[in-house]
């Protein structure tokens, strides 16, 4: 018997878990499944900006060799300019690491920090890679509640009550996946105050920082305080609709004088991986400094703006569903009336929906949400398809009772 490593116990990623496998089996039988399990814009007809594609093609010959283990200097300088423009102070190109998407960098940043049994405060609901990477690194993911009644903002009292002598870091996902919340400056100030008091590293996942609706204002965590060590994550997957390029970055800022050994560890982690995917590094500068096509998409009349409106309206007109309107990203995290539908197990709900209506959604428990009464919708399908998909959900729920 070849067994898997025990480090993989309790490590899961339900976005591509058993429900997804079942959806693929159904497709293999010749049926069509609307797969809303993952925030991957390209299959829904979104294209990266033309100049990004051109740059990739033009540079492909230059991208045959390894780059520096932290990434191409020109790309890291572009990332530096990007954060300087946002108002982050004292940035050095040496504090910027490129990676194969944010996912890759999350794994490195967490593994480079934790010892066995160390705790990390992770939001509930979370983007589940965060919980998985903490567990894989031998740490304990301690989930703090985000409060649906308060626009899904983190519950500060809950966070405070969960800090122990083993707590090493806190994860902030803003704009948030799966809730779509965008945090206020005041909230970030309070979170950083807590981090400073308890000497926590702040991991700020800001991969959706340009996908904002209505009057939502985004503040990068690193601009809020210099007194904590802040590791900020960003990339091309969402803002530039180029998830398959696997291009991301992380910036270490703030109390770097207290973190020389950790930063050295990050350097070691990066060098062990030789270097990130080089073709994609060549487009980072053009992406960050070129035409920001995403800004048109998020307008009320833009494609994402329209889809958000349709999805919200359709969802909230289904009896037994309520939903906080998202301010950012491209997800909604609606609540089911568990009494009305007799829901005990949200995985079962998602499986029943898949089998009957051929719609693949990820239930709230896949995002480490403790109550089994939510699910996430990815509103990337174009308006007509999205509208039909929401109708299929409504028809399903019209008679649904869990057994
Ligand atoms: N962080 C969050 C909050 C995400 O939603 C995602 C992808 O959905 C990622 C990180 C991973 O991004 P990447 O494609 O850069 O690995």
Image (spheres, rainbow, N blue to C red):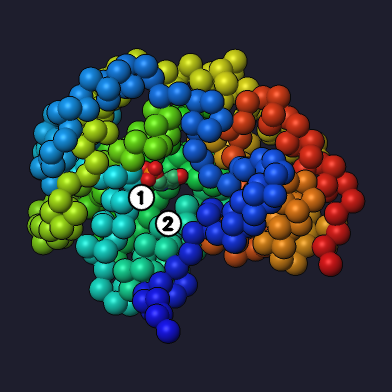
Q: Which residue is mark 2?
A: 129
Side (left or right) of 77 relative to 284 = left
Residue 276 percent coordinates (x, y): 22, 44
CB under 8 Å between callouts 1 and 2? yes
Q: Secondary structure at mark 1?
A: helix
Find disc 1 in the rendering and name its residue.
103
Q: Residue furthest right?
A: 399
Rendered residue at 41%/72% (across/down): 8
Q: Quadrant of residue 71?
A: top left
Q: Residue at x 43, y 62 (%)?
A: 131
Q: Residue furthest front?
A: 29
Mark positioned earlier in the residue sequence (1 or 2): 1
Of residues 385 and 118, the one nearer the viewer is 385
What crowding class fits label 2: few (fewer than 14 Cα within 10 Å), some (14-19), or many (20 or more)? some
Asked if the beta carbon under badge 2 is closer than 8 A to the nearest atom of ligand 1, the reply is yes
Foreground of the two, 24 or 370:
24
């Amino acid at each position: 018997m070849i067994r898997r490593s025990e480090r993989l116990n309790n490590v899961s990623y339900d976005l591509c878990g058993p429900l997804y496998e079942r959806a693929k089996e159904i497709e293999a039988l010749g049926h069509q499944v609307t797969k809303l399990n993952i925030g991957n814009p390209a299959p829904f007809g979104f294209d990266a900006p033309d100049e990004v594609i051109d740059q990739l093609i033009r540079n492909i010959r230059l991208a045959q060799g390894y780059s520096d283990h932290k990434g191409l200097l020109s790309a890291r300088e572009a990332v530096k300019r990007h954060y300087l423009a946002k108002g982050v102070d004292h940035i050095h190109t040496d504090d910027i690491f490129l990676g194969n998407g944010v996912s890759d960098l999350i794994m490195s940043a967490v593994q480079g920090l934790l010892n066995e049994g160390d705790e990390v405060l992770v939001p509930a609901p979370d983007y589940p890679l965060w919980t998985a990477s903490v567990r894989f690194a031998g740490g304990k993911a301690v989930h703090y509640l985000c409060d649906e009644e308060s626009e899904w903002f983190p519950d500060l009292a809950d966070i405070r009550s969960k800090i122990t002598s083993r707590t090493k870091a806190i994860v902030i996902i803003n704009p948030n996946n799966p809730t779509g919340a965008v945090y206020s400056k005041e909230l970030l100030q309070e979170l950083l105050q807590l981090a400073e008091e308890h000497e926590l590293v702040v991991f700020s996942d800001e991969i959706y920082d340009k996908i904002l609706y209505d009057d939502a204002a985004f503040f990068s965590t690193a601009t809020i305080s210099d007194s904590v060590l802040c590791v900020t994550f960003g990339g091309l997957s969402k803002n530039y609709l180029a998830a398959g390029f696997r291009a991301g970055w992380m910036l270490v800022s703030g109390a770097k004088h207290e973190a020389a050994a950790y930063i050295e560890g990050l350097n070691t982690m990066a060098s062990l991986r030789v270097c990130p995917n080089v073709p994609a590094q060549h487009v980072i500068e053009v992406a960050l400094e070129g035409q920001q096509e995403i800004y048109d998409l998020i307008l009320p009349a833009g494609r994402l703006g329209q889809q958000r409106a349709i999805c919200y309206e359709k969802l909230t007109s289904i009896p037994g569903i309520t939903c906080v309107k998202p301010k950012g990203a491209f997800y909604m995290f609606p609540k089911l009336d568990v009494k009305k539908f007799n829901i005990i197990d949200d995985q079962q709900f998602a499986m029943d929906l898949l089998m009957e209506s051929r719609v693949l959604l990820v239930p709230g428990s896949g995002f480490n949400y403790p109550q089994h009464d939510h699910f996430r919708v990815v509103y990337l399908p174009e308006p007509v398809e999205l509208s039909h998909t929401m109708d299929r959900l409504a028809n399903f729920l019209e008679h649904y009772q869990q057994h």
